[in-house]
Structures are given as structure tokens and as C-alpha cells.
Amino acid sequence: MKNLILTAAIGSTLASPVYAQNSVTLYGIVDDGFTYVNNAGKAGAIVSMVSGVLQGSRWGVKGTEDLGGGLKTIFQLESGFNTNTGALGGGGLGFSRLSYVGLSSDKFGTVTVGRQYDTIQDYLQPTTMNGNWGADFSHAGDIDNSDNSFFINNAIKYNSINYSGLQFEALYALGGKAGSATANSTVAGGVGYTNGPIYLTAVYESAKNPATQFPGGNFVGNQATPSANGPFGYVGNPANMQVIGVGGTYAIGKAMLGLDYTNTRFGSANGTNSSVLFDNYELWGQYAVSPATTLSAGYTFTAVKVNYLASSNRPKYNQFNVMADYRLSKRTDIYFMGVYEKASGGAYADIFDGWPAGQSTTTNQVLTRIGIRTKF
């Protein structure tokens, strides 16, 4: 009898399904440093401690559950914070950066729902200097969201598997407004292609009422004198936003070159029926001087067309960026950033939309920063 019971127990164990080990990972980034900005509005030149520039300071937890047959459940919760004050980022949200759950298939791709990155961040950001080296290098105050100034709520996102280097993504965000299926909604899509040292991408995004949808963005209210607030001062409270972007990178030994272009259009801007268009052109590169040291430099030209102002008013921004990064270990690095911006066409210089200081009182502005970042 004992042998029969033992045999049955063994048989039952062998018949049970076997799943791969599941995982839950706690991770984070802590970034802080000293930033100097000249011509910072009425304050003049200032030096301040600023958190989360090279990368936003954050902590998060992510995990997977193997469901068998190449299918698994995935989730990620990520919260931003200010290193200097301990305050939550994103307007005090518990998980201001990411909060999603979904299913991932080895054969069919990944579907996720919740608060997420958009296609610009997923596909275009890797081709930009700010996407690789920090917020201070953003395009005209991150007018195109290539530095993820805001995230997408109520998003349903599909990301394909890799087809011999080709991947694509589609996103739709429900507006969540009673009585309307499309109000405050977002539609986005993108495609990326990798072949050895080459990466190429194209993205599209259309959002209704972006200032309402994305309170974490840099949008400002309607301004009587738009140019007093730099790039976003021309935008006001737009009815819609459309971004088209293309970019690419090419690795050459220890070096990498990046080139990208975005066109951002805001409709019904500043309380008018007219639009505002931003064309951003960027060329940048980096070089690994040693296993521990990387140098980077880039140039961004931004041309603005404000259709509700006189045709002679065509704001332009020329921005020059430099970066030096030294890795103390696999987890910790120290870095130096430098930015010079020259504005024209009725605009004042305004590095990253005046953050952390304020718009320049002239057409020139300089920013420098020394910082430290550690990951866990």
C-alpha cells in the first residue's frame, strides 16, 4: 500500500505543469548636481541644486510571470522624486512615471495598458542627444516630448516582435471624458529598424487638448505677450498637438553619430484659430575616450512659425551642447554639461523652457552643470 501511495504521489508531481521561475525586480536611479544659469530673468545668474537632469531620479518595481507557451504577464510601477527635497514628482502622483500591466508573447508581441511612455520616447528618443545625455539638451524646452516631459494616461499600447531588425508600435489613449469617446485622446505609432551599427526610426503622434491631458508637460496658459515665455509662450492652451519625427544613429567603433528631425504643430494656439509650428533639426555625436570616459557634443536648430503673429516674427533658437561623463563604477558616474543658446526673430534665449532658472533677459543664455548619478 505504501508503495502504491508513493507511486501515485510521484505520478501526480510529474503530471503537474512546470513553469519557469518568475521575477520581481526593485530598481532605481538617483541623480543630483549643481546647475549654473546666467541671465535668469530678474534673478540674474543663479546656482542651484537640481535633481534628475541626466536621468530623472526614480524608484520602481517590475516583474514577470511565466504563463507557459512563450506567454508571460509583465508589469511595471515607477515613481519619480526630487533628490533634494524627497518630494514626489509628477504633481505628487504615487507612480508618476509608469504604471502598467500587460501580456507579452514570443510569437505575437506585447500589449500593455496603463500610464506609459509614448512612441516618441520608445522609438525616437534613442536618436536624440537629450535622450542619451539628459534634459538640458532638449529641443526648445522639450516641445516634442523627446525627453519625456509627460507620460500618457489610459494608454493601450502594442509593440511587435522583432522581424529581422524591424519593429513597430501603435498606441491609443482613451480620453476618459464622459459623453465623448475622442476628447482628450491620443493616437501614436512608430517603426524602427536596426541593422548592425545602424538604427533608423519614424514616429507620429496626435493628441487632443495636450495641456489638459499632460499636466506634467511644460505647457503654459494664454499669454498677452507670448515671447515673454520662450517656446511654450507661443503655444498657450492648444486644442491639439501633432508630432512627426524621424531619426537615426550610426555606431563607428568607439564613436556614435546621431541625426534627428521633428515637426511639432499646435492647433488653435494661444486662444486663436491659428497654429504654431516648431521644426527641430539636431546633429550630435559621442566618443568613448576610454572605458570610463565618454565625450559628446551636438547642435540643435529650432525654427518657429507663429501664424497668429506678424510674418516678420519668426523665432529661431541655435543651441550648442557639450557633455563629459566619467564612470566611477558600473553603477555610478560623475558628469559635466554645458549649453549655449542664441535666439533671434523676436525670441529670448530659454534653455529647457527656463528650467530650473528662468528665461533669459537677452537673446543669449549659458547653462553649466556638474552632477553625480548612481543606479541600483
Image (cartoon, rainbow, N blue to C red):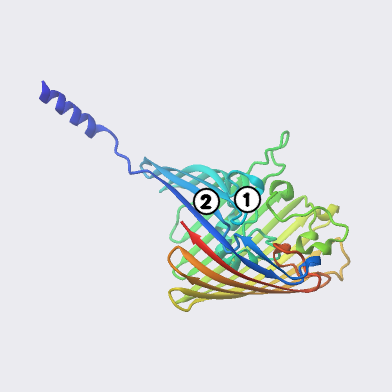
Looking at the image, is 250 positioned above or below residue 112?
A: below
Q: What's the distance in space between the residues labelled 1 and 2, CA to CA? A: 11 Å
From the viewer's side, name the closer residue of 316 and 229.
229
Q: Residues within 10 Å of mark 1 (few under 14, many from 20)?
A: some
Kind of residue sitting beneath label 1: Gly
- Whether tag 1 and tag 2 are in contact, CB under 8 A, the answer is no
Q: Residue furthest bottom?
A: 289
Question: Which residue position holds label 1?
Answer: 89
Residue at screen point 73% across, 33% down? 179
From the viewer's side, name the closer residue of 338 and 304.
338
Q: Position of residue 302 (x, y in %)?
A: 72, 69
Question: Which residue position holds label 2?
Answer: 59
Residue at screen point 88% across, 57% down? 224
Q: Is residue 327 left or right of residue 11?
A: right
The quadrant in which residue 336 appears is bottom right
Residue at screen point 46% across, 76% down? 254
Q: Which structural element holds mark 2? A: strand
Q: Quadrant of the N terminus?
A: top left
Q: Is residue 66 left or right of residue 35?
A: left
Looking at the image, is 373 positioned above or below residue 282?
A: above
Q: Residues within 10 Å of mark 2 (few under 14, many from 20)?
A: some
The quadrant in which residue 204 appears is bottom right
Kind of residue sitting beneath label 2: Trp
From the viewer's side, name the closer residue of 29 and 288.
29
Q: Position of residue 338 (x, y in %)?
A: 63, 74
Q: Position of residue 309 (x, y in %)?
A: 87, 63
Query: Which label's residue is closer to the chain start, 1 or 2?
Result: 2
From the viewer's side, name the closer residue of 235 and 133.
133
Q: Is residue 273 visible?
A: no
Q: Is residue 209 left or right of residue 333?
A: right
